[in-house]
Structure formats: structure tokens, C-alpha cells
Amino acid sequence: MNFNFVQNLNKGKAFVYGDDINTDVLAPGAYLKYSPEKMSKHCLESIDPDFVSNVKPGDIVVGGKNFGVGSSREQAAASLVILGVRYVVAKSFARIFYRNAFNLGLTPLICEDYRKINNNDILEINSKEGKIKNLTQNCEYNTNSVPDHLLKIVNAGGLLAELKNKIENNTLKTLRFRKDN
């Protein structure tokens, strides 16, 4: 899952949802037996039947607290990535979803002002600086800035893509442990 996108900056339409968006809503269990592409066609269908037909590459999902709660299935983040979502903005994230998101090339951003964002607002995000510009409302929100090592993973298209690039470019550094005497 490697997408060509502008590093650290993205602009898209907001799809706004509430609290506790469960991994089963993002990747329904009934579709886990199918390919990731087919499974992603059912992302969020239980709360927004039109999401898949309306979302475009670069669009942004906005949630409340505890986004990605539920099972540890990485397919939840993968479904969003396959559909072209680059960012999820929320008040808080379930721990495992948060890590899976980075590993799959999706950037989760914590924003206290998430409730000020309306459905269909156009947002411009700079994850390195921790800024979200709401172009529709002509205002700006603060978010967590993403550390460089995580930006590298996201901008490569995920952890596996970053490792592949490092292996191909012979830049993968091995860990060396110091022997204490």
C-alpha cells in the first residue's frame, strides 16, 4: 500500500463521526475472509452507507474519543488506507489502532478541537508542525506533531514499504549491542 502523496501536507474533505468508532465498523468481521480491497468496500457502512462511494483519495476521517477501539485487527487501518484516507483526526485513539495506523501508512492525529470540524469541511494538515487549517471555516487547530521517524514510515507508505526501501538502498542499519564488562 504505497501512495504518492505530498510529504507532511494534505488537503481533503472531512468525514465526521462520533466516539468509539470500533474496528468492526472500519473492517466488519463478516468480510475479513475477503481480499483487503474487497473488504474495504464495507468500511464504515454500518454508520455511513455512502462513505465508500463518497470518499476520495486525500480525504480525512474525523472521530471523537477512542477511535479504533475493539479488536487488534490491522485491517481497520488498512481499509482506510486502501480507500485513500491519509489522516484520521480524533480526540483519542485506541492504542493498538494508533500503532497499526502508522505501520500501514495512515497518520492518526490527536486534536482537542475535533468537535469544531463539520462534515464536508475542507482541511489542510501539516503533521510535522501539528497544524490543521479548516479552509471552510477559515480557522486553525493544533494537533500533535508527528515525530520524524513516524513521518518516514508514513511517507514511505507504511513500515514494510520503509524497510523494503532501506534494504533496496542498502541503508538498513543493524543493531549492535554493547557488551558490558
Image: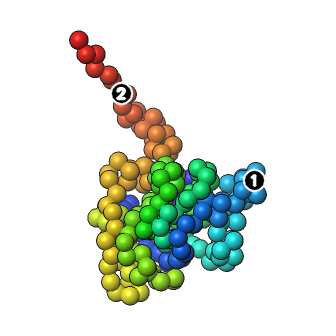
Which element type, helix, strand or loop, lies under badge 2? loop
**Residue 101 visible to an observer of this rendering:** no
Q: Which mark is residue 9?
A: none
Instruction: Tell me which numbered mark, 2 or 1, is placed earlier along the sequence.
Output: 1
Residue 48 in the image: state x and y as whole percent: 65, 76
Residue 79 in the image: state x and y as whole percent: 61, 60
Residue occupying the point 38% across, 69% down: 111
Quadrant housing residue 78: bottom right
Q: Is residue 7 left or right of residue 53?
A: left
**Residue 123 visible to an observer of this rendering:** yes
Q: CA distance from mark 2 to mark 1?
A: 37 Å
Q: Is residue 109 above or below residue 75?
A: below
Residue 109 in the image: state x and y as whole percent: 41, 64
Tell whether label 1 touches label 2 (CB within 8 Å).
no
Closer to the camera in the image, 45 or 13: 45
Residue 122 in the image: state x and y as whole percent: 45, 81
Residue receiving disc 1: 34
Which element type, helix, strand or loop, lies under badge 1? loop
Give the crowd class for mark 2: few <14, some 14-19, many >=20 residues within 10 Å. Answer: few
Extreme residue toward the bottom, this view = 137
Q: Amino acid at mark 2?
A: Leu
Q: Amino acid at mark 1?
A: Tyr
Q: Is residue 27 left or right of residue 166?
A: right
Residue receiving disc 2: 175
Q: Is residue 39 above or below residue 125?
A: above
Residue occupying the point 69% across, 71% down: 46
Residue occupying the point 50% across, 57% down: 94
Extreme residue toward the left, this view = 181
Point out the image quarter for the C terminus.
top left
